[in-house]
C-alpha cells in the first residue's frame, strides 16, 4: 500500500530539530515521501476497515508511503511494533490498541529513535505526541438520554462492560451511574456483567448470557446496553431466537456504527441504536497533526498546530443512530455526520478527496 507521489506541502521549510518534550524530536521530512506505519490488530471490524480506508486516502492525497500493519493479536503487538522501528518508519500511528499501556516502553524506544508516535482511538501513554478520538463518556450520555427519552424514562437495563479497557469503561460506567433508581426512579440497572474474562469467545458468551437473562427476567428486562456493536449484535440474535423478533420486549444498543448494526436497525430487529463514530474524521485529524509536526516542522503550541501540548487528544463526536435516521445501503459515510457542518459539494474538502480507494460507502453487511 505504497504511494510515491510527492505532496506539495513538502516544499515547506523545516523548523528547529530541537526536542519539544522528553524525547528526541521526531524527524522532519521534506525531501522524500513520509514513511507511515498504521498499526491495527485486525481489519475485520467496521472501525478498522473504515479507518484503514481513510488512511489510504490520506496517504495517497498527501504523497506518503503507507504500510498498514494488521498484526493479528495483542500478543503479537510488541514484535510488530519493533519491526516498524527496525524498518525506520518516520511515523507510527496506533489504531485502537488495547494493549498499549502494557507496551508503553516501546513507544518511548520509538521516540528515542526519532520516530513520531500518534494514537488514533487509542489511550495516550508517555511518548505519544498526540491523539485523535471520541469523548466516550459524552457519547455514552448522548446515547443514554436518547434512549431514556424515547422510552419515557422507564427502563430496567443490563450493561455489559469490559474491565480494564478504558474506552469501554468510559462508555458503560456513566450509564450505570444514572441507572441507580434514584436519579431517575424508573431507570434501574439490574445486571452489570464483565465480559473481559471471555474476550476470546465474547460473542458466544454474551449470546448465552442474553438467553439466561431473558429466561430469568422475562419482560422485566427492557434494555441491554453494550459498549460496541459486535457485542450488541450477538445479544440481538439471542433475543430474536427467543421469539422477540422486533425487540418489543427487550432491545439492544451498541456503539461504533458498523454496517451490520445499521442493517439490524434498518430491519426493525431488537438492535435499535448505535452510536456512529466518525472514524474518518479521527483519522484525518491525526494525519493533519502528523503533517504539521513532521513535514511543516511545527511544534505543539505553535500557531497552526492542532495540539497545544504534547499528548493532547483532538476530540470529535459522532451521532446516535436509530430507526429515524439509519443510513441506507450505498450512503456516503460522511453524510451520516452531515459532512461535519461543511458543504457536501465542496470539491476541495477532505471528505470529498477521491484519492486511493475513494470515499467509503456503506455496503451490504456480512453477518
Image (cartoon, helix red, strand yellow):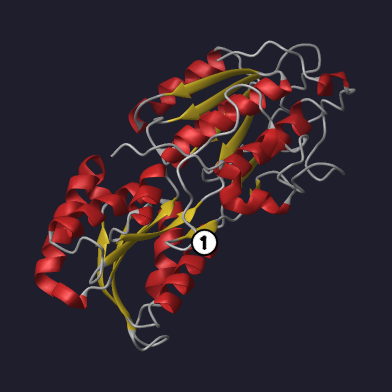
Image quarter of residue 194 = bottom left
Q: Nearer the viewer, residue 155 or 308?
A: 155
Residue displayed at 67% across by 33% down: 287
In-image side of 239 versus 175 (left or right) = left
Q: Position of residue 191 (x, y in %)?
A: 24, 70
Q: Which residue is mark 1?
A: 139
Q: Position of residue 124 (x, y in %)?
A: 56, 45
Crowd class of label 1 (few under 14; some 14 to 19; many from 20; radius 10 Å): many
Q: Quadrant of the C terminus?
A: top left
In-image side of 286 versus 261 (left or right) = right
Is residue 15 depicted above or below 351 in this figure?
Answer: above
Is residue 200 depicted above or below 295 in this figure?
Answer: below
Is residue 324 depicted above or below 218 in this figure?
Answer: above
Q: Position of residue 195 (x, y in %)?
A: 26, 53
In-image side of 260 versus 285 (left or right) = left
Q: Is residue 129 visible?
A: no
Q: Quadrant of the N terminus?
A: top right
In-image side of 227 versus 328 (left or right) = left
Q: Secondary structure at mark 1?
A: helix
Residue displayed at 71% across by 26% down: 26
Image quarter of residue 144 = bottom left
Q: Nearer the viewer, residue 175 or 154?
A: 154
Q: Nearer the viewer, residue 197 or 179?
A: 179
Amino acid at each position: 500500500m505504497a504511494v510515491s507521489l510527492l505532496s506539495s506541502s513538502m516544499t515547506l521549510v523545516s523548523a528547529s530539530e530541537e526536542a519539544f518534550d522528553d524525547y528526541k524530536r521526531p524527524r522532519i521530512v521534506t525531501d522524500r515521501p513520509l514513511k507511515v506505519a498504521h498499526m491495527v490488530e485486525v481489519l475485520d471490524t467496521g472501525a478498522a476497515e473504515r479507518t484503514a480506508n481513510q488512511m489510504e486516502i490520506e496517504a495517497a492525497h498527501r504523497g506518503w508511503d503507507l504500510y498498514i500493519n494488521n498484526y493479528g493479536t495483542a500478543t503479537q503487538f510488541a514484535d510488530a511494533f519493533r519491526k516498524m522501528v527496525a524498518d525506520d518508519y518516520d511515523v507510527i500511528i496506533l489504531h485502537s490498541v488495547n494493549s498499549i499501556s502494557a507496551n508503553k516502553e516501546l513507544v518511548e524506544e520509538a521516540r528515542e529513535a526519532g520516530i513520531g508516535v500518534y494514537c488514533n482511538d487509542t489511550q495516550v501513554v508517555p511518548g505519544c505526541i498526540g491523539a485523535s478520538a471520541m469523548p466516550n463518556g459524552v457519547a455514552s450520555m448522548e446515547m443514554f438520554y436518547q434512549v431514556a427519552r424515547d422510552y419515557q424514562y422507564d427502563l430496567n437495563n443490563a450493561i455489559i462492560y469490559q474491565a480494564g479497557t478504558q474506552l469501554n469503561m468510559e462508555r458503560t460506567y456513566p450509564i450505570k451511574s444514572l441507572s441507580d433508581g434514584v436519579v431517575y426512579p424508573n431507570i434501574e440497572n439490574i445486571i452489570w456483567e464483565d465480559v473481559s474474562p471471555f474476550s476470546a469467545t465474547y460473542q458466544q458468551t454474551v449470546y448465552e448470557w442474553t438467553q439466561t437473562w431473558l429466561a430469568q427476567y422475562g419482560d422485566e428486562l427492557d434494555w441491554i446496553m453494550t459498549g460496541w456493536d459486535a457485542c450488541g449484535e450477538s445479544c440481538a440474535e439471542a433475543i430474536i431466537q427467543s421469539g422477540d423478533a422486533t425487540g418489543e420486549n427487550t432491545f439492544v444498543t451498541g456503539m461504533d456504527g458498523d454496517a451490520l448494526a445499521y442493517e439490524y436497525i434498518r430491519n426493525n430487529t431488537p438492535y435499535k441504536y448505535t452510536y456512529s463514530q466518525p472514524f474518518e474524521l479521527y483519522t484525518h485529524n491525526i494525519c493533519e497533526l502528523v503533517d504539521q509536526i513532521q513535514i511543516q516542522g511545527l511544534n505543539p503550541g505553535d500557531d497552526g498546530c492542532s495540539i497545544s501540548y504534547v499528548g493532547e487528544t483532538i476530540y470529535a463526536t459522532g451521532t446516535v443512530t436509530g430507526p429515524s435516521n439509519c443510513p441506507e445501503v450505498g450512503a456516503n459515510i460522511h453524510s451520516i455526520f452531515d459532512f461535519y457542518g461543511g458543504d457536501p459539494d465542496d470539491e476541495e474538502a477532505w471528505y470529498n478527496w477521491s484519492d486511493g480507494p475513494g470515499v467509503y460507502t456503506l455496503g451490504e453487511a456480512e453477518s
